[in-house]
Image: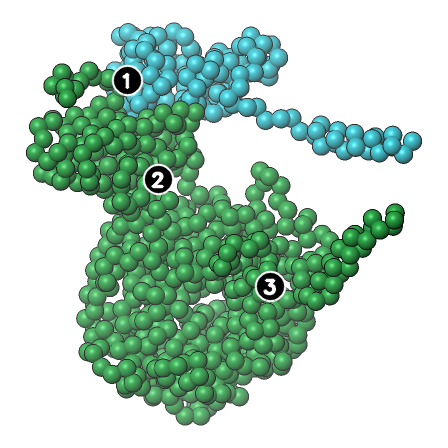
Chain colours: A green, B cyan
């Protein structure tokens, strides 16, 4: 009888062992003893790296610390964010303006940090909108979206926002070829081959202020442009774009765009394009695209509609574009730190081709072409090829570099990362990912100077990795220590939205430039209140402007009367604090948009149209002090045509006139 | 014996964890009275001067009116949400008589090095107990702080 007691225990042990036996790839096998210590960052200590992740269909960019995987911030970029009032405050609404009007959502795929001399300089990070084609610049002093530019003649901006080694240009390439904006688009879809074009865009970036301008576009044959990377070092002056659907299919691409054994990597000589542009070879084409800039002094965005773009024709201007055959439906197009090797990752290929920049240059000089594709020379495969990595895995997607002669390639279908040597093309190590890895990131892994302590894999599927949360599960990142010969998995962390590409950089490059608050003296918002003495409420027809201040722990004014039905009320709230980490929030009952979150020294405006007569509380939403719960006030709304005078006050408990209290 | 050893190990572990760092001061809790602080606190702390960059400020007997005007501008943007020029407390204490309660160095250190002063200074802590709102650091420049002091002097009747 006594030994029976242990039976359930033995049973449980057997069960656990049994389950392990069924699942060879589980975490227990992949994680070794010191992983926790390697990913541990003690409370109160800073992480060693910033990691910027695309939010994919969330439209935002998230910032994590490495190696802890702690979420530091979500930066709103292409989607509205009611939490921060982004896209809801009057000041930020113009950021999301496009030629289609206000667009509250997009799909952000790739972050790219600005560089100087091929090294990350920590000034800006760019992001692309895949749906309504745009590029955004985020200022890393404020971690806020500073500028968004729309791209004409494009449908889906995927091969973006990759940059040249001194951030001279950030590029964009149309994923979906479409008839150009200046042509009649009301044509049968099956005239793709004849009428659809692929435009790639070069956006210049101001050396000092980062200001973006659409410098020129290059009209290319109608294919799908997928990803890109700039040449560097010896190949500076060139840009490389992967292309698929060279079959030029317009339906069931899953089958019809997978017919040919090889598609292309397109090499673009952008220095040559600049020469043509200077020589006046570009055509000025009428179009319409929005250019939105956030001004940090007025704390207000301005949206300007541009009406012209200069286009260079790749067919006429022969020596800008060259096609290099690349097996098969290439996705990633990555250039190693020396600028000599260009790695194409064919989603459906069983090998990884590595092209040589020197050989490409020689092939062009020798005119070693196998023909042309819609008027653009196609270089012979062998004339451009350095070599192939044989049997690396299934479904190669993206490659990053460690600066020590090695490359790391993700394999979606076989769910693994493969480390290989660029020179001898030999596979050195494999690590499973959980599951279906897309992009990879090594800090500085696409620059001239990688800082290769870690490699992060961004996975599309997490299945059984986290506690179930209904049908929708978190996507995830997996952190590997790559300081040794073998990759070592040390941490999983879930992500915001879908992480596509990511960037990482040593914290020192960014953290010391971080703005702590906005100087109130420099605030030139037209509705700023510099001190409580300047607060007021002004009626202009049916518009009521409330010039309001917030400081721990009250609003001024906090009692407002004389608002009438039919009025539009604009709360212009200035945060008078001048210290780090003291935002105030502002909310009013029944507002159909969002709250405001106002940083110290900043002015933000919430528009509110009262929908009924009554008393409406306002309050601070961001716990600011011991008396935060006291940070509140009231707005009285009277019927249309009411004779209640416009009044506002703070700290005056005026007795109401008899007539007003009488029922 | 085994048990004892086990206990000893536990104690050692606890001691190692507990003894290594001094606990952070809780800003909401008043630690002892002002006099106790002065006797047991940092002996280098000068409660007359406060803590900060200002060690000695020369003040002329007569008011500098234009400097006081500059101080008034700073007051209107950064201070008057919480302070009155009378002796009435709003969020923070009223300013009437403040120049006779504190030295110029103490005031200028307090308005420029607010957090550290609230953490260290007995008089600042006594005020926190009354007001319960930590005064925000409004990031005044040195000139702002000096001008503000002149405005306080004017408010206290210096001509």
Q: Report the residue marked by disc 2.
A: A597
Task: Decide which of A279, A23 is in the foreground and name it.
Answer: A23
Query: Alpha-carbon distance for marks 2 and 3?
Result: 37 Å
Which of the image's four quarters has the C terminus of chain A?
Answer: top left
Residue drawn at x 44%, y 76% as measured from the top left: A242
- Residues at marks 2 and 1, common chain? no
Query: x, y percentage for residue A330?
Result: 48, 78
Task: Decide which of A71, A296 is in the foreground and name it.
Answer: A71
Q: Report the residue marked by disc 3.
A: A434
On residue B68, the disc is 1
Looking at the image, can residue A652 be seen? yes
Nearer the camera: disc 2 or disc 3: 3
Which chain does the residue under circle 3 lie in?
A
Query: x, y percentage for residue A651?
Result: 27, 19
Q: Which residue lies furthest to the front in this view?
A: A1
- Residues at marks 2 and 3, common chain? yes
Task: Decide which of B114, A66 is in the foreground and name it.
Answer: A66
Q: Is residue A308 above or below residue A555?
A: below
Tag 3 secondary structure? loop
Q: Which tag, 2 or 3, sits closer to the chain's start?
A: 3
Residue drawn at x 57%, y 12% as measured from the top left: B32
- Callout 1: 10 Å neighbours few (<14), some, many (20+)? many
Residue B89 relative to residue A383: left or right: left
Residue drawn at x 58%, y 9% as measured from the top left: B36
Tag 2 secondary structure? strand
Q: Is residue A230 above or below residue B14?
A: below
Which chain does the residue under circle 2 lie in?
A
Q: In this view, does A78 lie above or below A384?
A: above
Query: x, y percentage for residue B1?
Result: 92, 31
């Amino acid at each position: 009888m006594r030994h029976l007691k242990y039976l359930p225990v033995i049973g449980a042990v057997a069960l656990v062992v049994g389950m392990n036996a069924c699942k060879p790839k589980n975490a227990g096998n992949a994680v070794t003893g010191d992983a926790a210590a390697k990913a541990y960052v003690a409370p109160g200590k800073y992480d060693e790296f910033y990691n910027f992740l695309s939010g994919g269909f969330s439209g935002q960019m998230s910032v994590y610390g490495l190696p802890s995987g702690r979420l530091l911030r979500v930066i709103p970029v292409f989607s509205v964010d009611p939490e921060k009032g982004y896209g809801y405050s009057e000041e930020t609404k113009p950021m999301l303006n496009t030629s289609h009007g206000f667009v509250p959502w997009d799909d952000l795929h790739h972050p790219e940090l600005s560089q100087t001399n091929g090294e990350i300089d920590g000034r800006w990070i760019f992001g692309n909108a895949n749906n309504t084609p745009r590029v955004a610049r985020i200022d890393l002093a404020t971690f806020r979206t500073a500028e968004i530019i729309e791209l004409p003649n494009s449908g889906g901006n995927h091969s973006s926002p990759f940059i040249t080694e001194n951030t001279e240009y950030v590029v964009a390439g149309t994923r979906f070829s479409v008839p150009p904006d200046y042509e009649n688009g009301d044509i049968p879809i099956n005239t793709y081959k004849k009428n659809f074009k692929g435009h790639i865009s070069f956006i210049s970036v101001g050396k000092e202020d980062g200001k973006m301008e659409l410098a020129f576009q290059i009209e290319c044959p109608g294919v799908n442009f997928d990803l890109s990377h700039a040449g560097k070092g010896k190949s500076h002056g060139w840009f490389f774009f992967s292309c698929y659907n060279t079959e030029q299919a317009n339906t069931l691409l899953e089958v019809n765009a997978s017919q040919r054994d090889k598609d292309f990597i397109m090499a673009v000589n952008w220095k040559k394009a600049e020469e043509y542009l200077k020589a006046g070879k570009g055509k000025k084409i009428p179009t319409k695209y929005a250019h939105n800039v956030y001004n940090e002094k007025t704390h207000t965005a301005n949206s300007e509609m541009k009406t012209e773009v200069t286009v260079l024709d790749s067919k006429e201007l022969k020596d800008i574009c060259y096609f290099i055959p690349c097996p098969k439906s290439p996705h990633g197009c990555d250039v190693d730190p020396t600028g000599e090797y260009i790695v194409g990752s064919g989603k459906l290929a069983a090998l990884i081709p590595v092209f040589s920049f020197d050989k490409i240059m020689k092939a062009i000089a020798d005119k070693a072409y196998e023909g042309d594709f819609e008027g653009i020379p196609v270089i012979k495969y062998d004339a451009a090829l350095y070599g192939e990595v044989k049997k690396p895995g299934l479904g190669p997607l993206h490659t990053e570099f460690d600066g020590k002669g090695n490359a790391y390639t993700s394999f979606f279908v076989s769910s693994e990362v493969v480390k290989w040597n660029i020179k001898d093309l030999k596979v050195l190590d494999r690590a499973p990912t959980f599951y279906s890895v897309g992009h990879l990131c090594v800090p500085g892994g696409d620059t001239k100077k990688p800082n290769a302590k870690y490699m992060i894999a961004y996975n599309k599927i997490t299945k059984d990795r986290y506690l179930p949360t209904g049908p929708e599960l978190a996507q995830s990142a997996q952190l590997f220590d790559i300081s040794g010969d073998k990759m070592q998995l040390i941490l999983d962390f879930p992500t915001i939205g879908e992480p596509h590409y990511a960037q990482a950089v040593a914290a020192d490059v960014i953290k010391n430039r971080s703005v702590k608050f906005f100087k109130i003296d420099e605030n030139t918002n037209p509705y700023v209140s510099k001190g409580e003495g300047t607060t007021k409420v002004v009626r202009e027809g049916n518009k009521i402007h409330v010039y309001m201040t917030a400081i721990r722990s009250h609003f001024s004014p906090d009692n407002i009367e004389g608002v009438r039905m039919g009025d539009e009320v604009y709360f212009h709230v200035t945060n008078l604090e001048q210290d780090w980490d003291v935002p105030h929030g502002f909310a009013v009952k029944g507002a159909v948009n969002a709250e405001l979150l106002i940083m110290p020294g900043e002015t933000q405006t919430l528009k509110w149209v009262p929908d009924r007569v009554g008393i409406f509380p306002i309050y601070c939403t961001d716990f600011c002090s011991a008396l935060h719960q006291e940070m509140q006030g009231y707005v009285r709304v009277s019927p249309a045509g009411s004779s209640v005078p416009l009044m506002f006050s703070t700290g005056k408990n005026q007795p109401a006139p008899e007539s007003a209290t009488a029922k | 014996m085994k048990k004892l050893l086990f206990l000893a190990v536990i104690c050692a572990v606890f001691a190692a964890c507990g003894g290594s760092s001094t606990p952070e001061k809780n800003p909401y809790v008043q630690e002892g009275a002002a006099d106790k602080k002065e006797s047991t606190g940092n002996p280098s702390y000068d409660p007359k001067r406060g803590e900060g960059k200002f060690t000695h400020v020369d003040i002329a007997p007569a008011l500098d009116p234009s400097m006081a005007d500059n101080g008034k501008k700073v007051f209107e943007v950064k201070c008057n949400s919480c302070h009155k020029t009378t002796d009435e407390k709003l969020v923070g204490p009223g300013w009437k008589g403040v120049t006779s309660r504190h030295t110029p160095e103490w005031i200028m250190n307090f308005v420029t090095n607010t957090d550290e002063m609230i953490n260290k200074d007995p008089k600042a802590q006594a005020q926190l107990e009354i007001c319960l709102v930590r005064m925000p650091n409004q990031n005044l420049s040195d000139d702002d702080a000096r001008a503000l002091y002149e405005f306080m002097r004017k408010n206290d009747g210096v001509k």
